[in-house]
Image (cartoon, rainbow, N blue to C red):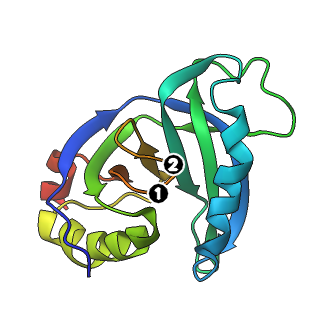
């Protein structure tokens, strides 16, 4: 199991994300790289794009699976081509974890977060979109580097009262 450091808490603002999305089963994550390959040529070319980071948003989770959106942040959705999926990530509090190393091991990091680090933190998860943030320390050509994982949680004062 992956060694994951305890999270930092961070208030997140609303994020406007545009990219390509697909509904996946929990055992069907092998198709996620195809979404990133499809997005790659468009990075830096979308209207109102905020440069510096790319995002993998996980939403509409249920017993069957989830939707995954590989995208970039925008200041507005105006002018986004029709073939793109747009998604508004709400403002909320996040427990932020860091995945180190090759992206192929992120599944083990996620397992460590859910089975160990999140429960140990005493934070209560929210049923809300989570996301991965790929920044300057991540090399998309090699798949190596740090990825921040933003897990929505109840603010600490809410966690203590439950």
Which sits in the foreground, 86 or 91? 86
Quarter holding the N terminus is bottom left
* Left or right side of 48 for 127: left
- Residue indicated by mark 2: 140
Q: Quadrant of residue 40?
A: top right
Residue under the point 21% across and 50% down: 158
Residue under the point 25% across and 38% down: 10
Which sits in the foreground, 131 or 63? 131
- Residue indicated by mark 1: 143
Residue with the most extreme right position: 82
Which sits in the foreground, 31 or 116? 31
Which sits in the foreground, 117 or 29? 29
Residue with the most extreme front position: 142
Kindly report the distance in space between the C-alpha atoms of the residues bearing marks 2 and 1: 5 Å
* Mark 1, other Cα within 10 Å: few <14 / some 14–19 / many ≥20: few
Q: Is residue 50 above or below residue 1?
A: above
Q: Is residue 19 visible?
A: no
| Rendered location of residue 13, percent (x, y) | 40, 29
Q: Are marks 2 and 1 in contact (CB under 8 Å)?
A: yes
Residue under the point 16% across and 49% down: 156
* Left or right side of 133 for 161: left
Q: Quadrant of residue 17?
A: top right
For label 2, the SS is loop
Q: Is residue 106 visible?
A: yes
């Amino acid at each position: 199991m992956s060694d994951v450091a305890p999270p930092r808490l961070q208030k997140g603002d609303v994020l406007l994300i545009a990219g390509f999305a697909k509904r996946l089963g929990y055992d069907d994550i092998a198709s996620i790289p195809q979404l990133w390959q499809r997005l790659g040529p468009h990075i830096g070319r979308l209207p109102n794009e905020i440069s510096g980071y790319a995002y993998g948003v996980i939403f509409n989770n249920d017993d069957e699976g989830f939707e995954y959106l590989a995208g970039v942040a925008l200041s507005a959705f105006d002018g986004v081509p029709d073939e793109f999926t747009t998604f508004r990530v709400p403002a909320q509090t996040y427990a932020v974890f860091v995945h180190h190393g090759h992206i192929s091991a992120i599944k083990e990091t996620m397992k460590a977060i859910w089975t160990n680090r999140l429960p140990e933190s005493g934070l209560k998860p929210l049923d809300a979109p989570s996301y991965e943030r790929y920044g300057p320390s991540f090399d998309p050509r090699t798949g190596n580097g740090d990825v921040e994982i933003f897990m929505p949680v109840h603010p600490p004062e809410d966690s203590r009262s439950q």
